[in-house]
Amino acid sequence: MYRKGKSSWLKHADFVILDIVCLQLAFIISYWIRHGMDIPYKHPLYGNMALVLVFIQMVVSFFFESFSGILRRGDMVEAKTTARHTTLVALLAITYLFLSQQGDNYSRMTLVLMWIFYVILAYFGRFVLKRFLNTRKFTEGEERSLLIVTSSSAADSVISTIRGTNYGTFHLAGVVLMDCDKIGHCIQGIPVVADAETMIPYIHKNWVDEVFFALPKEILIPEQLIKDCSSMGVVIHMRLATMKSLGRNQTVEELAGYTVLSSSIRIVTPRQMFIKRAMDIVGGLTGCLITAILYLFIAPVMKVKSPGPVFFSQTRVGKNGKPFKIYKFRSMYMDAEERKKELMEKNSIKDGLMFKMDDDPRIIKGIGHFIRKTSIDEFPQFWNVLKGDMSLVGTRPPTVDEWEKYELHHRKRLAIKPGLTGMWQVSGRSEITDFEEVVELDTAYIADWSLKMDVKILMKTVMVVFMGSGAK
């Protein structure tokens, strides 16, 4: 699942917030010069005007796109743009005072001084923030892992362009050279990880969120590469110069200095992802509080039944192959992982892509069965949700040994963050023994995802937990 690029207004929220701060500072300084060292917000007329100014500033930022392309603007262009933006804010403020018939009571000197200081502070603030961001161009982020597919002749230029606009957004997973085999070499510090023959196996078993095809026109992109990337649920970006049809879920946008055609199993808006993340944060905070309360009751019993840590951590594979540590209340004996190998022949899912067994002897008698039956063992995962490793609703994160057995199309179920609950869990997980059916359910969830669907799954999960059905 892929979040569409933000509009310039949202993309540069840092500049919008900085501008609001500069405007308020200009407002306070101008008030002090005219009226003395007093707090302007406690006076009804000026307090209301301070709020109106914030609203006006945001309106001007949104409708006039004052921050569009701000990182590429030179100092003189920035000065003109800042002067235009601040003048528009001042003119709208005057219009508001005139229409509300408050102009006679509001100091004209305060308004003029505010505009002058606003121009100076806004320009200086933008200048400093732009310089700071420019020092972070080469900083790699941890949110999105990008694999660059290019040629040996274009690699230097492509990496330089991406790095020049990579303000901590992408983790550069590596480079794939389509015209030669230089695996193991580095280009500007980025490793060459594959060639045309080994690209798909590399993506299959490594953390790769997105693939960017930036090839010269003379090098054709094999159709099978596109199909295989699509079958794994990987987001595909293709520079328009090498554009091919990528399917129905596609959008034209800007990626690190290039205009590209992007395709994914599901494309969502920033607003949708913001709401989903907000739900995760609220749910994560609530769940962590409940986890702390449950710990007070579970810990003493656990120490008696099976000495050892109360919490269990394990490496799982998350979105697009990114590993993370998952946390649970320990419901099994300390040697559970070693005994799992001995019990694989009793696994009800025969292909070994998941492990599920009735009357698992590794579960701690009494307390272990209880917390699994009631799904209490899952509560520490709310910490994973709060951290952003997981979501309230998603797909089940596989263990590393399960991940290593995945075929290409199985990887598609990891095109979204793993979840505490999901389509599989509320569809009778105890009865499903065919992993292909799990993949089918998860893929359908990702392709048809909506906020309404998440709410329905959460409601069904509550019913499943209270009825005690479908538990592990």
Image (cartoon, helix red, strand yellow):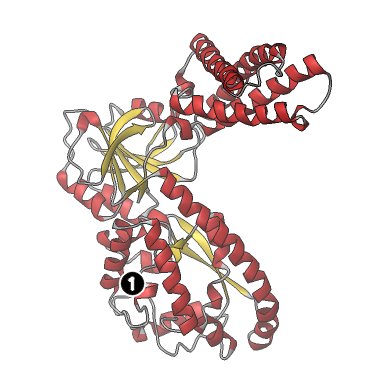
Between residues 119 and 390, which one lies in front from this camera angle? 119
Q: Is residue 344 above or below residue 6?
A: below
371 and 333: which one is in front?
Answer: 371
Depth check, front residue: 120 or 294: 120
Relative placement, left or right, of 254 versus 41 is left
Residue 137 place in picture, x, y as percent:
50, 29
**What's the residue type where badge 1 is placed?**
Leu
Quadrant including the C terminus: bottom left
Residue 292, quarter of the rendered image: bottom right
| Percent x, y of residue 127 | 58, 18
Which residue is situated farthest in the right direction here? 37
User: At 36% across and 68% down in the image, what residue appears?
Assistant: 423
Residue 299 visible in this rendered orientation of the protein: yes
* Mark 1 crowdedness (10 Å alpha carbons): few <14, some 14-19, many ≥20: many
Identify which residue is drawn at 50% across, 85% down: 362
Q: Residue 409 is drawn in which quadrant?
A: bottom left
Query: Image height check: is 227 above or below 117?
Result: below
Q: What percent of the width, then of the height, locates residue 71?
A: 48, 23
x, y (%) of residue 376?
56, 77
* Disc 1: which residue: 353
Q: Is 362 left, or right, of 24 in this rendering?
A: left
356 over 169 or under it: above or below: below
- Please give the name of the residue rendered at 33% of the width and 75% of the height, measured from the top-left corner: 352
In the orientation shown, which residue stands out farthest toward the front? 101
Quadrant of res 192: top left
Query: Does residue 394 appear in this view?
Result: no
For the point 22% across and 35% down, the residue is: 179
